[in-house]
Image (cartoon, rainbow, N blue to C red):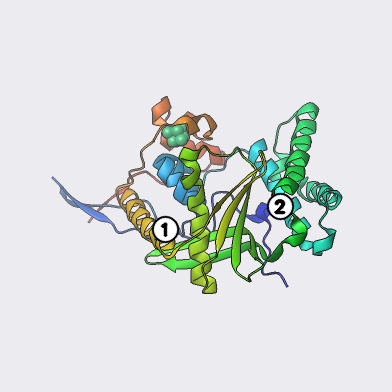
């Protein structure tokens, strides 16, 4: 019996419910009296992707997770959604039925399921680009079989939603696959459809999976024996063994990051951090590092909508 199944395509872009927690106000002296600086509301929760977004660029984090601005669909992300769904369907089959042909049939089914989804319908691709898109997706599914024999996998949860309170932080995550190994130990698996990171970024990539280990320990009362990233593009597996120390380290770093986010929200201070990721940033036109005005980003929501003022002042 599988645990809760939650399809990736149901996940709201930018995270979960818009409900936000109030941040403490800060107080400043002013010639006209004391003024209260109302900061930006805190996010409802953190996830591995929002944690990584804040670390990479606080301004991009603000746009995505606080302002919740829409982002145009990207072929890379949509292809990932499609392949994840195909592998989810494959794992729902009896073990002996998990063949390459079955996986390709599941890819066709996923393609039909997702055809009308805005993440796919909104892609502006030529017929040739679509053909390439589906060839790539098929190649990723085929390469999955070079990484493991799916008939030996014993999944107990697919697209499994986990949430735990870690100190002051509500931490959430969705595990692609939770399974039991031959010794009955828990294993967390995350499929990756992007490029394999260099050794320099390997531990950073595993950060999200260690977060899943922490969530498992908190919610299921057991630390996974293994966490693994299956990079389908090469293919290559990056495998780590969570320890008491690594899990405590994730908890400590998450709490520290939450403090940094609280501070940024209280001061409404989300600075851009230019990097090679700017090339893929949906908000580059509104980024001061590239001559843009962040407050104009509200226009991404369409006419008649505004973002809250960046730093509203209220007389005390
Ligand atoms: S363009 Fe770069 S620096 Fe600017 S918001 Fe995006 S990621 Fe951050």
Q: Residue 148 carries which label?
A: 2
Q: Which mark is residue 58?
A: none
74 up-or-down from 46: above or below: above
User: Is residue 190 visible in this depiction of the protein?
Assistant: yes
Q: Which of marks 1 and 2 is nearer the N terminus?
A: 2
Tell whether circle 1 marks a residue whose Cβ is less than 8 angstroms from ligand 1. Answer: no
Q: Which mark is residue 250?
A: 1
Tell whether circle 2 marks a residue whose Cβ is less than 8 angstroms from ligand 1. Answer: no
For residue 309, which quarter of the picture? top left
Q: In which quarter of the image is ligand 1?
A: top left
180 up-or-down from 50: above or below: below
Q: Tell me the element at label 1.
A: helix
For residue 79, which quarter of the picture? top right
Relative image position of residue 112 (x, y in whole percent): 82, 48
**Residue drawn at x 39%, y 36% as measured from the top left:** 272
Quadrant (top left/top right/bottom left/bottom right) for the C terminus? bottom left
């Amino acid at each position: 019996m599988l645990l809760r199944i939650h399809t990736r395509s149901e996940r709201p872009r930018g995270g979960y419910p818009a409900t936000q927690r109030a941040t403490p106000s800060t107080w400043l002296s002013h010639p006209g009296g004391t003024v209260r600086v109302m900061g930006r509301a805190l996010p409802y929760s953190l996830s591995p992707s929002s944690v990584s977004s804040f670390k990479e660029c606080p301004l991009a984090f603000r746009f995505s997770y606080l302002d919740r601005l829409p982002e145009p669909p990207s072929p890379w992300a949509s292809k990932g959604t499609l392949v994840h769904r195909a592998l989810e369907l494959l794992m729902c089959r009896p073990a002996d039925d998990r063949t390459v042909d079955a996986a390709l049939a599941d890819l066709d089914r996923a393609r039909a399921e997702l055809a009308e989804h805005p993440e796919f319908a909104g892609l502006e691709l030529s017929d040739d680009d679509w053909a390439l898109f589906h060839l790539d997706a098929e190649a990723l599914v085929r390469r999955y079989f070079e990484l493991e024999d799916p008939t030996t996998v014993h999944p107990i949860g697919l697209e499994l939603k986990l949430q735990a309170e870690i100190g002051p932080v509500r931490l959430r995550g969705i595990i692609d696959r939770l399974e039991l190994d031959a010794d009955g130990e828990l294993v967390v698996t995350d499929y990756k459809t992007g490029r394999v990171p260099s050794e320099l970024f390997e531990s950073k990539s595993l950060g999200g999976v260690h977060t899943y280990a922490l969530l498992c320990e908190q919610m299921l009362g057991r630390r996974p024996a293994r966490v693994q990233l299956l990079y389908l593009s090469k293919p290559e597996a990056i495998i780590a063994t969570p320890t008491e120390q690594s899990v405590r380290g994730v908890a400590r770093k998450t709490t520290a990051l939450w403090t940094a986010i609280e501070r940024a929200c209280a001061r409404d201070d989300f600075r851009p951090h230019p990097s090679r990721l700017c090339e893929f940033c949906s908000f580059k036109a509104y980024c001061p590092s590239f001559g843009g005005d962040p407050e104009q980003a509200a226009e991404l929501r369409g006419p008649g909508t505004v973002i809250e003022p960046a730093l509203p002042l209220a007389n005390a």
